[in-house]
Amino acid sequence: MKEYIKGAKAGVPVIFGFIPVAIAYAVMAKQAGISAGETVFMSMAVFAGAAQMMACGMYAQGAGVAAIVLTTFILNLRHLIMSTCVINKMKGGGMAVRLLSSFGVTDESFAIFTTQPEEHSSPAFFLGLISVTYSSWVGGAVIGTLVSEALPPTISSSLGIALYAMFIVLLVPGLRGNLRLGLLVALTAVINSVLSLLMSSSWALIAATLLCAFLGVFFVELDEEKEDAHEA
């Protein structure tokens, strides 16, 4: 129980980031024509802010189910790696606990848990952590559905840029000091723009992402690889 409480305390700072973004997501969902119940249920079942906001944006643009599912799948592929790292670091716990833990992995919970000392590598600590992050995300979505009607139109419209702001926040740390990665991001945007003239914007995004991800395997040099080369 002590480890659970320590994990919950470690997740408290995340609340201040999750709730505002969850409110912005709820406003986007409303603008896309998604009901309040569906908005909250998506937060409960998906628990992936960037993917949910992407799905709302694509739904508003009239994208089909297949395009939305494939795009969010690609966007969330990193969770496979993060979940594996969390499970490998976790000491003890059966399969059911590990599967539940994998569901609760986000960028924030991954960063907090993997940087903890070894004594806090228990399933109880991580469950305490994701209890706070999950409840704040779902709670923020609930708040968003309640206040979206009361928000002035100007504020509601401005929250539509939250998706782009979130992606910029995710991108910028990785772009620092990596010119090739920055060029690859720019190339992805250009290819997406060109393909959007030839096909629907949703499928253009998928095609540009897959193509440039493939190119990145040969084109982008990670910092870890540079360090290994220098040491050799």
Image (tube, rainbow, N blue to C red):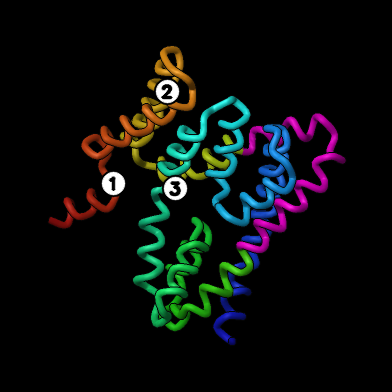
Residue at image point 38% right, 70% down: 87
Q: Nearer the viewer, residue 151 or 199?
A: 199
**Pointer 2 residue:** 192
Q: Nearer the viewer, mark 1 or mark 2?
A: 2
Circle 2 — which element?
Answer: helix
Circle 3 — which element?
Answer: loop
Residue at image point 38% right, 21% down: 191
- Distance CA(mark 1)–CA(mark 3): 20 Å
Q: Can you tell which mark lies on residue 76?
A: 3
Q: Quick one: which residue is furthest to the top in this view?
A: 197
Q: Nearer the viewer, mark 1 or mark 3?
A: 3
The 10 Å Cα crowd at callout 3, few under 14, some 14 to 19, many 20 or more, is some
Tell me, yes or no, whether the highlighted magenta stretch contains residue 161: yes
Vertical comparison of 121 with 218: above or below: below
Tell me, yes or no, whether the highlighted magenta stretch contains residue 29: no
In the image, taking residue 171 as reference, residue 128 lies left or right, namely: right
Circle 1 — which element?
Answer: loop
Q: Position of residue 8 (x, y in %)?
A: 61, 74
The part of the chain drawn in magenta is 134-162
**Pointer 1 residue:** 222
The 10 Å Cα crowd at callout 2, few under 14, some 14 to 19, many 20 or more, is many
Callout 3 amino acid? Asn
Vertical comparison of 178 with 48: above or below: above
Callout 1 amino acid? Leu
